[in-house]
Amino acid sequence: MEPSRRKFIQSTSAALGALSFPYVSSRANSANASKKPNILYLCSDQQHWQAQGSVDPFFDTPNQDALAAESTVFENAFCTTPQCSPSRSSMLTGYYPHTTEMMNNAGASGGTDLKLQTIGSHLQEAGYTTGIFGKWHLGDDPIGNAGWDEETKKGPDPKTTERGIGFLEKHVQDEQPFALFLMYLDPHDIYHYIPGKSKVAIDDVQMPESWKRQDFDAVPKVQREFMEINQGAFIVDADEDVWKGYRDYYRQKVKLYDDHVGRVVEKLKSLGLWENTIVVNTSDHGDMDTFHRLVFKGPFMYEHMMRIPLSIRVPGAVPRKSSYNWVNVDTVPTLLELAGGVAPQCHGQSAAAEVLGEGSTPDREYVIGQYYGKQTWVNPIRSIRSRDWKYNLYLDWGEELYDLRSYPEEIVNLAGDPKREKMKKRLRNLLDRWIDEHDDPFYTLSTTQLDPDEGSRILRKRG
């Protein structure tokens, strides 16, 4: 499809041009000075930003923590949407889901096959040998699937690690740089949690404040429906220990992903590739992890859905923490600039200067989030988040307004508070302007009612 040619507003402007990667020659060892940096991209599935020991000691992630300690860590990193296929389409193309046409998961209502060129093709044009192993979930269109010299677009995770290590061993002596993308399934397997059957340890599990204080009468009704007659029905009326078991089971799945990170990084180092390889660690979206008495992902835009882990380690760059508002559409322009390639005009902007701590990156005043639906249940939502406020607009089911300074867990919905009307109107106007500037079809979409039989089928599959 032909992307919109309208001028993008500053909050999502495209950054053009490319670096020649000068810091490699000035800071790295001379043996690698003339070679472009390799790229290792590690991506989990359904890991929220707090699911790292470096952020929350509840989680056991020594390998991700060690990697973060040598990286630029983006403390405000977001996905475009909390769904697998559309978020992955954004991270690999630089466009929001309404432009990739993958507004939902492949095969679901509003989902399709990715038909746009991905970062793989751009990196090939920049002289890279490319590989991708693990979860794909973007369909079979030949344009969307092109760009990979070596690929196995399926799991399971142990095989993904084996294939990734094999790729590194095969290309360790190449003059040509490589870009290896490893796309893992965990902690998505949180869906396998079955109360009373799954092995869990809950002695140290604490429940979030929002679990204790959630008021479903104060938020759009689809959140209650999700829990009572959809994917949350197995736990909605359970006692606290069952909810604690969910948290521990999720922690276990995050740890499994972390183990794979450790194996791949160890191999990278043992092969002598560490000093000339950019390493990215991120996820496609989050998981509710019992916050707000919600599980998995669904028709809601809370921080645990939208905020993701992101660290980018560049050889020779000074480790730092960044407050820059990263959106995963920035992946393509940022990596291409770091790789000395040319970024396409897209919804993202390059944050290469932010990664390096040199120069400046155009500020992103606010972050836009999109949601379409899951399976056949369509509930379009748009979200706009500044550093201190978040406003969510449901197409048919109401609004949410959260003061992130006073309530970081988004406990009190202020959308109906007359004292906050001015702030709500300001955010709504900014959101509408973004929708107009980016040809977002939000107001032309339609909702569908939840099919109770679909919820029953989901529960039967769980056993």
Image (tube, rainbow, N blue to C red):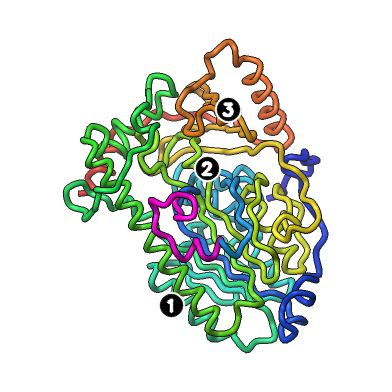
User: Residue 233: horizontal and vertical position, in percent?
Assistant: 27, 36
Name the residue furthest left. Answer: 196
Q: Which residue sits at x=66%, y=77%?
A: 276
Give the residue number, with chain letter if any, for mark 1: 162
Instruction: Using residue 447 as the reference point, say whether residue 17 is left or right of it.
Output: right
Q: Which kind of residue does numbered mark 2 sit on?
A: Met
Q: Which residue sits at x=41%, y=63%?
A: 257
Q: Which residue sits at x=74%, y=72%?
A: 126
Q: What element carries label 2?
A: helix
Give the residue number, with chain letter if any, for mark 2: 306
Label 3: few (<14), some (14–19) or many (≥20) C-alpha neighbours in 10 Å? many
User: Residue 437: horizontal and vertical position, in percent?
Assistant: 74, 35
In the displayed structure, would residue 380 be above or below residue 260?
A: above
Q: Which residue sits at x=49%, y=70%?
A: 133
Q: Which kind of residue does numbered mark 3 sit on?
A: Tyr
In the displayed structure, would residue 130 be above or below residue 292?
A: below
What is the spatial separation of the Cα atoms under label 3 and label 1, in whole angstroms? 43 Å
In the displayed structure, would residue 106 be above or below residue 118?
A: above
User: Residue 344: horizontal and vertical position, in percent?
Assistant: 75, 57
In the displayed structure, would residue 407 be above or below residue 333?
A: above
Instruction: Using residue 448 as the reference point, say whether residue 338 is left or right of it.
Output: right
Label 2: few (<14), some (14–19) or many (≥20) C-alpha neighbours in 10 Å? many
Q: What stretch is highlighted in magenta?
A: 51-68
Query: Would residue 445 be seen by someone viewing this image from the given angle?
Result: yes
Q: Which kind of residue does numbered mark 1 sit on?
A: Glu
Give the residue number, with chain letter if any, for mark 3: 391
